[in-house]
Amino acid sequence: MTIVIAVEGGEGIALTDEHAASSYGQLVVVDDQGNAHGPGDPATDGTGGTCADQVRRLIAEGDVIGKLRTFAGGG
């Protein structure tokens, strides 16, 4: 599975479990060079924090969960 989150006016992010560095289905962030980064690795956007922080920030900024719920009919 590959999930791409692109926030208007900002950088997007790709998460996948199809990268060689992904183990047991864990999602990893893949940067524009094809390098994989786990949740505890430094954020790829240079903001400090971890990749998990970066993903949480993008999800919140784009209201990703709310939009997925609406699309799927849950709310």
Image (cartoon, rainbow, N blue to C red):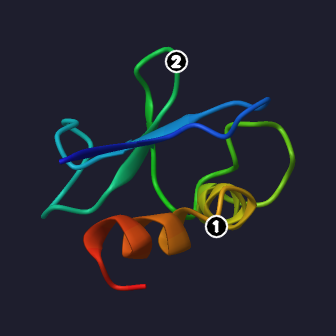
| Identity, as a three-letter code, of the amino acid under mark 1 | Arg
Against 75, is 71 above or below? Answer: above
In the image: residue 10, left or right of residue 38: right
Q: Quadrant of residue 71?
A: bottom left
Q: Is residue 51 left or right of residue 22?
A: right
Q: CA separation, marks 1 and 2?
A: 19 Å
Q: Which mark is residue 10?
A: none
> For the residue carrying disc 2, how many other residues have a C-alpha within 10 Å: few (<14), some (14-19), or many (20+)?
few
Q: From the image, which quarter does the C terminus lie in?
A: bottom left
Closer to us: 61 or 57:
61
Give the residue type that dot 2 points to: Asp
Residue located at (79% from left, 60% from top):
49
Would residue 73 be found to the left or right of residue 35 on screen? left
Residue 37 drawn above or below residue 34: below
Q: Which residue is found at the position 19% from the left and 36% from the top?
A: 20
Judging by the rendered image, the residue that carries numbered circle 1 is: 56
Q: Position of residue 40 (x, y in %)?
A: 57, 64
- Residue 26: x and y in percent read 26, 62
**CA neighbours of label 1 inside 10 A, class few (<14), some (14 to 19), many (20+):** few
The answer to which image quadrant residue 27 occupies is bottom left
Q: Residue furthest right?
A: 47
User: Residue 16: where, in percent of width, then height?
Assistant: 29, 45
Q: Which residue is mark 2?
A: 32
* Nearer to me, 53 or 59: 59
Going 17% across and 48% down the picture, which residue do you hit?
1
N-terminal-most mark, 1 or 2: 2
| Eye-nearest disc, 1 or 2 | 1
- Please report contact status of discs 1 and 2: CB closer than 8 Å, yes or no: no
- 73 or 1: nearer the viewer: 73
Residue 32, above or below 45: above
Count of numbered circles on the image? 2
Please, what secondary structure does the residue beneath circle 2 have?
Answer: loop
